[in-house]
Structure formats: structure tokens, C-alpha cells
Image (cartoon, rainbow, N blue to C red):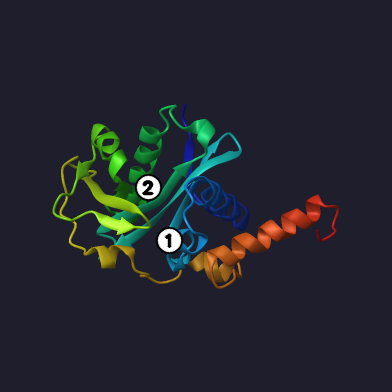
Amino acid sequence: MALKVSVVASKTDLYKVLRIRERVFVQELKVPEVLEFDANDFRSIHFVFKEGEQVVGTARMRFFKGQEFAKLERLCVLPDFRGKGVLPGVMAQIQRYMMKEKGCHKLFFLCEEALVPMWQAKGFHLISTIAPIPVDKMNLHTMGIDTKTKGLIDVLFTPEEMLKTSGAEQPFVKAWKLPKDSLTYLKQVMMINNTLQNGGRDS
């Protein structure tokens, strides 16, 4: 199964990808909302994964040292689309975007310890010079790849640098007149949708 990956370009798709993260990380994996939706949401590029017109997954990307390094975050797909071989195609499209549009070929991300062998099997490298990072009862390992050479990269950042709020707000925040943070936006739209579904009456 192949999914189409594109950069979120509308408030509607932004809501949809935040909603998917709420379903996967908050409801399914029990990540607290205040950890899942952070200040970096409005400082990131967001990707939307679609099968046809259906939004089925997402990820976000932040850049470090200008645009020399790209960090992929919040990667997820809905349960019905897991185990169907979608990840290689998704990752290939994301890597093409970062190289073509941003001139960046050094990609890294954090993953749970149990997923390290899966990512290694897909060609990514464990960056053993960075110790596992404890986050909300998980140990997160740093994986990376040079998308030109397929080799290992040196990630020159501390865990604190990788996790902290960094970078300028994306232009879409002001253009779409978004609230102060992504969690507020998500809850606002969910409340509006619930009201509409109840015939315009608050429940």
C-alpha cells in the first residue's frame, strides 16, 4: 500500500493531523496531552499522509543548525494502516522533500527502544554516542541517516537541545490566525465539530 505524503497547507488538514496524533499518542499510547502538543508544533513543518482523500497519518519536522539537520517527530499512522508496508514509501517521500525543498540530507529522530531493530532493518543507524533519553516512562534512542550516502551521521546535539522549544514560528500560524498553541486549536475545532454534530446545540 502506498500513501501520498505532502506538507500540510490548510487549517483543515492541520486539524486532521493533530486529531490523528490525539487518537494515536494520547488515546492509544496514553501520552499526556501537555507532552504530545507542545510549543514546537507551531515551529514545525507538518506532513499529512493520505490514502486517496482520507488522512491516515502524519509527522512533523524541525531543522537544526540552519537547515543542516532535519529532525523527524510525531510519526504515526492509524491502526488500520499499520503492518502494510507503508513506512518505506512515507520515509522516502519525506527524505525527497527535505533534500529537494530544504537542501538537507542529514535526518535523525527518536524512537522507542523496542522499535530500534525495525528501523535498523529499514536502513537507519543507531547513534550510540547519545545515551537513551527517558521521556514519560519510555527510553528513546536516536536514529539517523545521511540520505545521500545512506551512512551514519554525527548528531551534535544534547538531549536537552533536541527536546527544547526552538526555531521561529512558521508563517502559517499568523496567516491562519491560529491560537497560541496547537492543543488550544485542536480543542476549539473539536468543540465546534461536536456542536455541529449535535444539531448546533451545545451538549
Which residue in the structure is indicated by mark 2? 97
**Rendered residue at 33%/44% (across/down):** 95
Q: Is the residue 177 above or below the residue 198 in the image?
A: below
**Rendered residue at 38%/57% (across/down):** 136
Q: Is the residue 162 above or below the residue 139 in the image?
A: below
**Rendered residue at 43%/61% (across/down):** 44
Whole-angstrom CA distance, mark 1 to mark 2, is 14 Å
Pick whichever, 68 or 55, lies toward us. 55
Which residue in the structure is indicated by mark 1? 44
Which of the 4 image quadrants contains residue 160? bottom left
Pick whichever, 6 or 16, lies toward us. 16
Q: In this view, does 174 lie to the left or right of 46?
A: right
**Rendered residue at 86%/53% (across/down):** 199
Residue 55 in view in this figure: yes
Which of the 4 image quadrants contains residue 63? bottom left
Going by the numbered disc 2, the residue's amino acid type is Tyr
Going by the numbered disc 1, the residue's amino acid type is Ser
Q: Is the residue 189 above or below the residue 141 in the image?
A: below
Residue 47 rendering spot, x and y as whole percentages: 46, 49
